[in-house]
């Protein structure tokens, strides 16, 4: 496909973290966003304008990196001092994503991850109103993690709310990506999604390793170069089929 070929469509990416923030979720989303841009998709990312671990770090409001349009939203990251602070930032971020996402031109699909944990709510609203497919990339599994860590109880309102949202997004998403078979099993216990489930393990990022031997760096790059096009193919094929 040459540069004169028409774009397959517009992919909207919702993620509270994105490069240059070093958070792993943002790094993986950036890899796939770039891969989709190389496939001639228009990729628009909505993310926070401050660092996830360090909210004193501020990023440009608008930027274009490797063909990816990045739009960073204010009041979306206040640090990790408490669950309440994270929920506030996550709620504000999701609200702004809905407002911005509804007006993205020529929207073809939405890719959403679990940063913040309930960002899928914004994706479901946008998907329902704009009538576009949702691709759900599960990086963390809540309330499961918080329950296992003893932070909340299974019967708590927060856990019930998370599980309700999980069941809804697993029903509405046209494609679900899990990190491993154990996560896939947990997701299937919430709702049978075998027909639309793909397991793709995460890959390391050598740019954020302090000291790695050359051979290890080559292995890291090789693994990423194999997996990144695969996940981009999963997204572009599914989105293209849904748009037909």
Image (cartoon, rainbow, N blue to C red):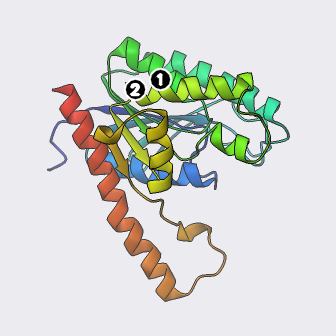
**Label at residue 48:** none
Residue 124 x/y as whole percent: 46, 21
Taking depth in this image into account, of 59 and 194 the one nearest to the observer is 194
* Number of other residues with Cα within 10 Å of mark 1, as a class: few under 14, some 14 to 19, many 20 or more: some
Q: Residue at x 34, y 52 (%)?
A: 231
Q: Is residue 223 above or below residue 14?
A: below
Q: Could you say which quadrant of the image residue 207 lies in?
A: bottom right
Q: Is residue 40 above or below residue 219?
A: above
Q: Residue at x 28, y 47 (%)?
A: 234
Q: CA distance from mark 1 to mark 2?
A: 5 Å
Secondary structure category for the residue under label 1 = helix
Residue denoted by label 1: 168
Q: Is residue 103 above or below residue 113?
A: above
Mark 1 touching mark 2, by CB under 8 A?
yes
Quarter containing the C terminus: top left
Residue denoted by label 2: 171
Left/right placement of residue 18 relative to residue 168 reads: right
Q: Is residue 165 above or below residue 35?
A: above
């Amino acid at each position: 496909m040459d540069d004169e070929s028409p774009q397959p469509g517009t992919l909207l990416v919702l993620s509270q973290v994105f490069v240059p923030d070093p958070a792993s979720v943002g790094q993986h989303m950036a890899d796939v966003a770039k891969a989709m841009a190389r496939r001639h998709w228009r990729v628009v990312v909505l993310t926070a304008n401050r660092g996830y671990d360090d909210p004193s770090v501020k990023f440009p409001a608008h930027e274009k990196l490797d063909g990816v349009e990045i739009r960073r939203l204010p009041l979306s990251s206040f640090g990790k001092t408490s669950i309440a602070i994270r929920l506030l930032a996550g709620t504000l971020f999701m609200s702004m994503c809905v407002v911005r996402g509804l007006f993205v031109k020529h929207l073809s699909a939405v890719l959403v991850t679990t940063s913040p944990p309930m960002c899928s709510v914004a994706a479901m609203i946008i998907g329902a109103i704009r009538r576009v497919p949702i691709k759900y990339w599960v990086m963390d599994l809540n309330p499961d993690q918080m329950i296992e860590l003893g932070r909340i109880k299974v019967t708590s309102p927060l856990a019930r709310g998370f599980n309700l949202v999980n069941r809804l997004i697993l029903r509405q998403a046209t494609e679900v990506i899990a990190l491993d078979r154990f996560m896939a099993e947990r997701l299937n216990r919430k709702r049978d999604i075998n027909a639309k489930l793909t397991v793709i393990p995460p890959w390391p990022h050598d740019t954020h390793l302090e000291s790695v031997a050359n051979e290890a760096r080559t292995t890291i790059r090789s693994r990423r170069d194999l997996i990144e096009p695969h996940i981009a193919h999963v997204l572009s094929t599914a989105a293209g089929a849904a748009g037909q």
